[in-house]
Amino acid sequence: MALTIHGIAASRALRPLWAATELGLDFCHVPTPYQGGATRTPEFLALNPNGHIPVVVDERPEGEVVVWESMACALYIARHHGVADGASITPVTPREDAEVLRWSFWVMAECEADALSWLMHRVVMPEARRKPELADAAERRLAVPLRVLEQHLAQQQARGEAHLAAARFTVADLCVASVLQWLRPARELMAAHPLTRDWVKDCVRRPAFQAAQASRAAA
C-alpha cells in the first residue's frame, strides 16, 4: 500500500501529516500550497473538486481511496493505518472511538472559526490589515467552549486519564490540539484555562508534531 498526502504543514494539512508521523508511516508528502493556483489544476481538481488541501490518496489492494477534509484525513489515517493496540493514536474501544468523533467534530463546530480569526488578526496578518475588534470578539466567544474542554480535562484527570479519550495520546488529542495550538499566544485566554493550556503544550511538544511542522521548512 502507498499513502500520499497533498498539502503543506502551514495549513490544515498539518493534521494528516501529524497523524501519519505519529504512526511512523512511510508516506509520500506532496507539498501542495493553497496559494498560487496549485489546487486549481485539472489534476488536483480530479482529486478534490473543492480545490482545497489536504488530500490523502491511499493506494490499497482493493483500489484507490481518496479522502479530503483535514479532520476526515486524520481520522481515516488513524483508523485504517493505525493498530488498535492501546498504545497508538488509534481508538480501541467504542468509548474511545466516541470520544475521538465527538471532540473532533466539536472543535470544528465550536472553536475553529474563532481560533482562526483570532490567529489572523493577532498574529498572521500584517498589522495594517488586522482588525483587533474581530480578535477580541473571537476571544470572548472562545471562552465558552474552552470552559467545556477545561471541565472535561478535569474529569479525565480525576479518572487518571491525562488525555481527551484515554490515558494515552490519541487522534482525538491530535485533532483538537491542531486547532487550539493556534491560541497559544493568547496568554489571558490560556491562563484562564490552565488545564487546557498545559494539555495543548504537552501535545505540541510531541516529536511527531515537531517533525510534521518541520516539513513546512522542507516544502
Image: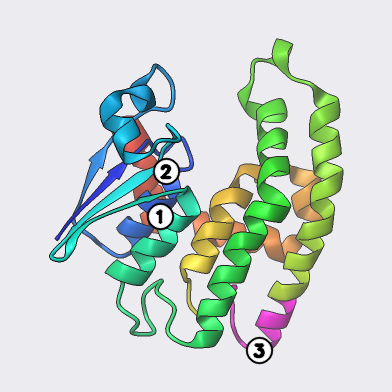
Q: Is residue 127 left or right of residue 209?
A: right
- Residue at the (84%, 57%) spot, across then down: 144
Mark 1 = which residue? 73
- Residue at the (59%, 49%) spot, across then down: 179
Q: Quadrant of the N terminus?
A: bottom left
Q: Is residue 42 shown above or below 70?
A: above
Does any portion of residue 166 appear in the rendered image? no
Question: For mark 1, does the 10 Å Cα neighbourhood hold few (<14), some (14 to 19), or many (20 or more) residues?
Answer: many
Near-viewer residue (15 or 124) = 15
Question: For mark 2, does the 10 Å Cα neighbourhood hold few (<14), some (14 to 19), or many (20 or more) residues?
Answer: many
Q: Amino acid at mark 2?
A: Ala
Q: Which residues are magenta?
A: 154-165
What is the secondary structure assignment of the residue under circle 3?
Answer: loop
Q: Nearer the viewer, mark 3 or mark 1?
A: 1
The circle drawn on residue 38 is none
Lower sequence index among marks 2 and 3: 2
What is the secondary structure assignment of the residue under circle 2?
Answer: loop
Mark 2 = which residue? 13
Colour theme: rainbow
- Residue at the (62%, 66%) spot, across then down: 103
The circle drawn on residue 159 is 3
Q: Is residue 117 shown above or below 83?
A: above
Q: Quadrant of the C terminus?
A: top left
Distance CA(mark 3)–CA(mark 1): 30 Å
Question: For mark 3, does the 10 Å Cα neighbourhood hold few (<14), some (14 to 19), or many (20 or more) residues?
Answer: few
Q: Is residue 101 left or right of residue 213?
A: right
Tell me residue 175's x, y (percent).
52, 58
